[in-house]
Image: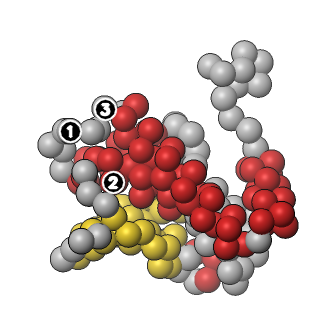
Amino acid sequence: MLRPILGDFSSIICFKAAISGMEEALGEKATAIALTSAGRSRGKQLAEELGLIGTNLALEDVVYKLGLALGKDGTCLCIINKVETESDVIKIYTSETLCSAGESPGSPRKCTYTLGAVWGALEQVLGKRLLGKHTESILRGGSHDVFEFTQLK
């Protein structure tokens, strides 16, 4: 435990206030780049902490373990609902993401940190460079926040 009384977690309200402050100081694009990069770094670290690097686990098993670590009984970053693969595209379906929490319907907010965390973990486990995109949003009528990953060549 990092803090003996308050514990290891802080509120979404405080994290989102930090995002708003960064957007005011740096602009939306620079903040999105920074948060995605920070998420990727955390995802890579998480894959290492979970012992997923160099394993021969099926993608579904890897995503299940990530879901446990990031979900309700883990850091509460998001719920990973399912994974699908279509030819060379990996789709991760998420809900209750940190990034979408508290946003109004129709908000243009994209998941940056959450996308980055999943992205970084997948890159570490698969040993491949990926391109990640937030393609569907709960905020804009989607059933999930969907992250799509394709291998960079």
What percent of the width, then of the height, locates residue 121?
A: 39, 49
Mark 3: give few (<14), some (14-19) or many (20+) Cα within 10 Å: few
Residue 59: quarter of image: bottom left
Q: CA distance from mark 2 to mark 3?
A: 14 Å
Of all residues shown, which one is farthest toward the left?
56
Q: Residue at x 27, y 68 (%)?
A: 151
According to the image, label 3 marks what residue? Answer: 51
Q: Nearer the viewer, mark 2 or mark 3?
A: 2
Give the quarter of the figure containing the C terminus: bottom left
**Quarter holding the N terminus?**
top right
Quarter where residue 50 is shown: top left
Q: Which residue is at 61% across, 83% downward?
A: 140
Identity, as a three-letter code, of the amino acid under mark 3: Gly
The three-letter amino acid code for the residue at tag 1 is: Gly
Badge 2 or badge 3: first in the primary sequence: 3
**Percent from the top left, x then y, of residue 22?**
78, 60
Front residue of 129/61: it is 129
Q: Are marks 2 and 1 in contact (CB under 8 Å)?
A: no
